[in-house]
Amino acid sequence: MSIDKENNLFNTNFIYDITKFTHLDYPDHLSCIVWFGGCNMRCDYCYNKDIVFSKNGNYSFNDTLDFLKTRVGLLNGVVLSGGEATTHNLKEFTQEIKKLGFKIKLDTNGLNFKSIKELIDLNLLDFIALDYKAPKDKFLKITHSNRYDEFSKTLDFLIKSDIKFEVRTTVHSDLIDENDINIIINDLIQRKYKNNYYLQSFLKTTSNIGDLGTPVKKFDKAIIDDSYIKIVWR
Ligand code: SF4
């Protein structure tokens, strides 16, 4: 199928930026990162404020596909990140990326279960990094979203599916402590999650959404329960 150049979906600038090369983001792949504008959360520790609040991006799907055509044979992966990529219609775009022969990794907060399920059912994704933001009782405080149940549905679906995926949490120890992380680990065990669980420390930048400083509380890694799930700090 050739893309209709007048098609609004393919000519609207949803994409804030493109990182042209990384070997760090998609395990075992040379990739580019497509940064989608907009997000359905407002995490205080987010360091992509400009992307989350952007109204107009700089690149359209057609621009991105034109770029990807120049990378066939040089890259083997495309990372869809943001912001939250699934706040946009990804079906036709990922179909076109697949036709060029790239694998696709999606970074997601898991709120858009319907879209994620559709993309997986159509074999349009190869890897997912799912943020587990906080235990249910702290989800609203951390994300400013009350849609834990939708995230939970996505997590259960991924665990039951065959897709490769990982779960990760950002730790700002004034917001989320060792007990919270152990609650998440216990929840992952109950759900029969078998992969590594990645923890990443909060990054203070000039672009955080919330007015957060360096954490005051100490985070004791020794208290984290790693008896059943491998914990990896990044
Ligand atoms: S950290 Fe939170 S607000 Fe920022 S892009 Fe991710 S989900 Fe959206």
Image (cartoon, helix red, strand yellow):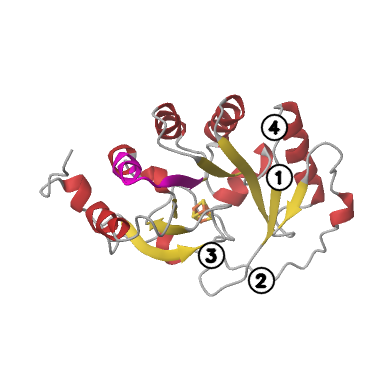
Mark 4 belongs to which amino acid?
Tyr
Mark with earlier residue (1, 3): 3
Mark with earlier residue (2, 3): 3
Q: Are marks 4 and 1 in contact (CB under 8 Å)?
A: yes
**Which region shows up in magenta?**
94-107
Q: Which residue appears at 84% of the width and 43% of the height?
A: 226
Q: Is mark 3 within 8 Å of ligand 1?
A: yes
Q: Which of labels 4 and 3 is toward the front?
A: 4
Q: What is the secondary structure assignment of the residue under circle 4?
A: loop
| Magenta-drawn stretch contains 101 | yes
**Residue 213: numbered disc:** 2
Mark with earlier residue (4, 3): 3
Taking depth in this image into account, of 15 and 177 the one nearest to the observer is 15
Mark 1 → mark 3, Cα distance in angstroms: 21 Å
Mark 4 → mark 1, Cα distance in angstroms: 9 Å
Mark 3 belongs to which amino acid?
Tyr
| Magenta-drawn stretch contains 34 | no
Q: Which of labels 2 and 1 is toward the front?
A: 1
| Residue at mark 3 | 47
Q: Against 84, is 213 above or below?
A: below
Mark 2 belongs to which amino acid?
Gly
Q: Residues within 10 Å of mark 1 (few under 14, many from 20)?
A: many
Mark 2 → mark 1, Cα distance in angstroms: 25 Å
Q: What is the secondary structure assignment of the residue under circle 1?
A: strand
| Residue at mark 1 | 197
Q: Residue furthest left?
A: 6
**Residue 193: numbered disc:** 4
